[in-house]
Image (cartoon, helix red, strand yellow):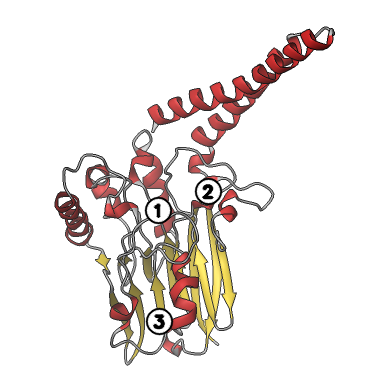
Amino acid sequence: MTKLMILASLVLGLVLAVIPHVLWVITWICSKCFHFSVSYAPFGISALVLVVLLWLILAYGFFIGRFRLDVNHIEYANKDIPQSFDGYKIVHISDLHLSTFDDRPSELQKFVDSINAQNPDLICFTGDLVTIGVSEAEPYTSILRGLRATDGVVSVLGNHDFLIYARNFNSVTERENAVIQLAEYEKNELNWNLLRNENYVVRRGDDKITIVGVDNQCSSNQGFRTISRGDLPRAMQGTDGFRILLTHDPSHWRGEVLPKTDIPLTLSGHTHAAQIKLFGKTPASLSFIETDGLYTEGDQSLYINVGLGCTLPVRIGANAEITVVTLHQK
């Protein structure tokens, strides 16, 4: 992450430095054609100020913003929630991208401690444990095993978990085998309930709620095309009563969940809110209809968690997030 940050800072700094110099060249050519004088100083100073300002912003995002944490509380009511689940507490997390913590593993431990401090009944993880490989996760096994919830951890696979951005595979079969290895790691090493187009029933006596989980499903024309492996009809088979869907990509909600199901609550991640949010606005809105937070249409709701980790090692305004969803019978 540190090397990536240095490289990004140098490249972006160079781009910003070039812009005033291009303007200066254009102005200098015009001055020769139309016989007026022009000073280089304002352009050179502008380039310096832009680069220094950029580096200060990136330094904040890397050293401070990357590990600022918001704990957001949502009270969710629905008539189909059984009485015995009134007050049931779900902690929703997403997008760990564990290489984020390679230079500061203690920050991941702090995040885990903050999750446990919510005393969750259930932890739901909506995908992207890693960015390019299972080797990213192995150094953090003991920390992740420390997650505590009465009914355990339920997870799904995100687009990065299918390792489609890794360049070290010689064949599709080799990549698919690595995905299986990652899935086995979540189930056997972390003891998570990984749902691959499956469902998980939580019971309290005769009452139940069902967690439906699908592999990454990229729907509609939102965002960029990643990979679509979700099979929602299969995952919903045999389910009834109150259901919560875990699906990594929030475009799935508008693409399939809203028009074809009556699932009341969907939890997603994926967008990271572009890891930039200023004055309540995020560049993610250029690609996604729903970018972060809670959305409701009719009797169906979507919550998008902006994640705990990073793809690029900077967060500015879009802080890492733990979402605490407390269920209530309406």
Disc nearest the viewer among 3 and 2: 2
Disc nearest the viewer among 1 and 2: 2
Residue 131 x/y as whole percent? 33, 46
List the residue tagged with mark 3: 243
Graded by Cα atoms within 10 Å as few (under 14), some (14 to 19) or many (20 or more), the crowding at tag 1 reads many
List the residue tagged with mark 2: 274
The tag earlier along the polypeptide, 1 or 2, is 1
Give SS at disc 1: loop
Left or right: 289, with 211 as reference point: right
Query: Compared with residue 175, is residue 20 higher up or lower down, i.e. above or below?
Result: above
Quarter of the figure that contains the C terminus: bottom right
The tag earlier along the polypeptide, 3 or 2, is 3
Residue at left offset 55%, top offset 83%: 299
Give SS at disc 3: strand
Q: Amino acid at mark 2?
A: Ala
Left or right: 227, with 188 as reference point: right
Dots 1, 2 in contact, CB < 8 A: no
Query: Compared with residue 50, is residue 129 higher up or lower down, i.e. above or below?
Result: below
Residue located farthest toward the bottom when viewing the structure as drawn: 206
- The answer to whether residue 263 of the structure is visible from this angle is no
Residue 102 x/y as whole percent? 34, 36
List the residue tagged with mark 1: 95
Query: Compared with residue 316, is residue 103 higher up or lower down, i.e. above or below?
Result: above
Residue at left offset 54%, top offset 55%: 287
Residue at left offset 31%, top offset 73%: 231
Q: Amino acid at mark 1?
A: Asp
Graded by Cα atoms within 10 Å as few (under 14), some (14 to 19) or many (20 or more), the crowding at tag 3 reads many
